[in-house]
Amino acid sequence: MDLTTDTSAAQSQRADYRGRFAPSPSGPLHFGSLVAAVGSFLAARSQGGEWLLRIDDVDPPRKVPGAADGILRTLENYHLFWDGPVLYQSQRFDAYEAALTQLAAADHSYPCGCTRREISAISPTHIYPGTCRNGLPPGRQARALRVYCDEQDLCFDDSLQGRQCQRLGRDIGDFIVKRADGLYAYHLATALDDAFQQVTEVVRGADLLDATFPQLYLQRLLGLPRPAYLHLPVAVTAAGEKLSKQTHARAIDDSPPGEALGRALTFLDHPPPEDLHGAAPGELLDWAIAHWQPASLPRSKTLTIDTNETSS
């Protein structure tokens, strides 16, 4: 059975556009973050819609003190102004726990006693082999909670990357919804919060393309609405390494906002005209909103950039 998300129907039926940007407070925003922020902002504003901001602080060990406030200041400095209050995932734990109760009550989840090392020893691909699927082995204690995944095809039509399909049981395996350290998993929090914020389209980097499948699956199990999806190309170095906080990508705070915005727009194949080179962020964004054309976006999952330019 093809469990397809009918993106075109979802778009035609929605009354108001609601987009979102959801950075994690593990460090300052870098050029890759700016591309995602600008893409989602322009998708919303070009349709007269709302652009929401969520801080994905569901993983406290990765939080950097002061990073969340720094992200807000940076967005304001770039004139990327959001609508409504900022949503912090750390304030949503009751909702996540309620969803876990719902999954358990419907027999969609089960306790798992396996460690990462044990899974890696059995499965070189790190796909969970189903050790605890039919009950914890003797002498083992529950560490995490997993969701049963079936062997049906799960598909959706990405507005930029095209038709995407996976078979969760084969390609991902039973995935975790609550970790061994007691923290709620990214897929669970994201699926619930996109529904809570009534997001109609998720615009984010293509590095999260595969993450869409567990989130769609949870939406189905929990009876949540499904947004449309558009996954932008991800900025990578000449060595093919994604710009990220983990790889010490330079913070965009070090760059003049107008110049960095111009580079982000050019990366997205929306280069500003010459008379706007060096313009203030507000002017650039006004131009970009008026000229935003999703059909002009590069249809690629990655694009190589000159890191010297993005760090100047």
Image (cartoon, rainbow, N blue to C red):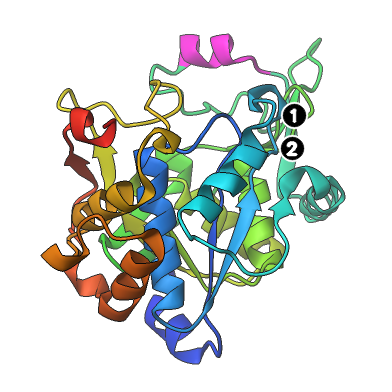
The quadrant of the image that shows the C terminus is top left
**Does residue 54 sit above or below 226 in this rendering?**
above
Q: Which of marks 1 and 2 is in front?
A: 2
Label 1 Cα crowd, 10 Å radius (few <14 / some 14-19 / many 20+): some
In the image, residue 118 sits, relative to residue 4, either above or below, namely above
Q: In which image quadrant can residue 156 be found?
A: bottom left
Residue located 70% across and 57% down the image: 86
Is residue 2 in sight in this rendering?
no
Question: Visible in this render: residue 127?
Answer: yes
Quarter of the image with the N terminus in it: bottom left
Sequence order check, earlier mark of 1 and 2:
2
* Magenta span: chief secondary structure: helix
Q: Quick one: SS at disc 2? A: strand
Say which residue label 2 marks: 110
Q: Do the residues labelled 1 and 2 touch (CB within 8 Å)?
A: yes
Considering the numbered disc 1 on the image, is that residue within a helix, a strand or a loop? loop
Query: In this view of the protein, which residue sits in the foreground, 207 or 268?
Result: 268
User: What type is the residue that disc 2 sits on?
Assistant: Tyr
Q: Which of 159 and 131 is in front in this view?
A: 159
- Please name whichever residue, 243 or 160, is drawn nearer the observer in this view of the structure: 243
Query: What range is drawn magenta here?
Result: 114-122
Identify residue for label 1. 135
